[in-house]
Amino acid sequence: MRNKGLKPDGDSIPSFDEVASIPVSRRSPEDRAQDIDDVLTWLRNGKPDTEDPTGEFKKIDQMLPTKKSQSPEDRARDIESALDWMRNRSPDGVEEDDLPFEKLGSIPVTRRSPEDRAQDIGNVLNWLRNGKPDTEDPTGEFKKIDQMLP
């Protein structure tokens, strides 16, 4: 365009949008291949703890669902991919087990007897059969729940 003496209009040039970053593994392909070999050896030898000193293979193997007719090589690749993903997402030096554990307070739960539940079911059914009158729903709970349901 410049060599021909043409000048672009300011409105016809599209603006540049920033492209999101592409996820890149922090480990080299050789390290990842070694991890696949280690996982495959671990799988073929019956998953001994001696070949999984950190316990990472076992933990991921228990979490990942097995696929129908999955070969050991495919399983090793899946475990290594999950392991690589976790290593790239985890802050350096901080693992899930290292985070402080906070206890949650108890949730108050009312214990109702089977007779009380049967009485509630009877009350709701009568309320529905009688056309949902306010006289059979003194607390307004039936109406509130009825409005929430599709």
Image (tube, rainbow, N blue to C red):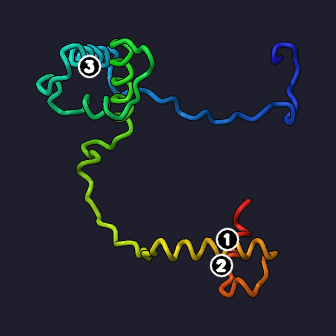
Q: CA distance from mark 2 to mark 1?
A: 6 Å
What's the amino acid at mark 2? Answer: Glu
Q: Residue at x 74, y 59 (%)?
A: 150
On the rendered structure, is 8 left or right of 123? right
What's the amino acid at mark 3? Answer: Val
Q: Residue at x 72, y 69 (%)?
A: 146
What's the amino acid at mark 1? Answer: Ile
Mark 3 lies on residue: 39
Circle 3: element type: helix
Circle 2: element type: helix
- Upstream in the sequence, badge 3 or badge 2? 3
Circle 1: element type: helix
Q: CA distance from mark 3 to mark 2?
A: 56 Å
Residue 126: horizontal and vertical position, in percent? Answer: 72, 75
Residue 98: horizontal and vertical position, in percent? Answer: 23, 50
Q: Residue at x 79, y 76 (%)?
A: 130
Q: CA distance from mark 3 to mark 1?
A: 52 Å
Mark 2 lies on residue: 141
Mark 1 lies on residue: 145
Quadrant placement of the N terminus: top right
Are circles 2 and 1 on residues that touch, CB within 8 Å?
yes
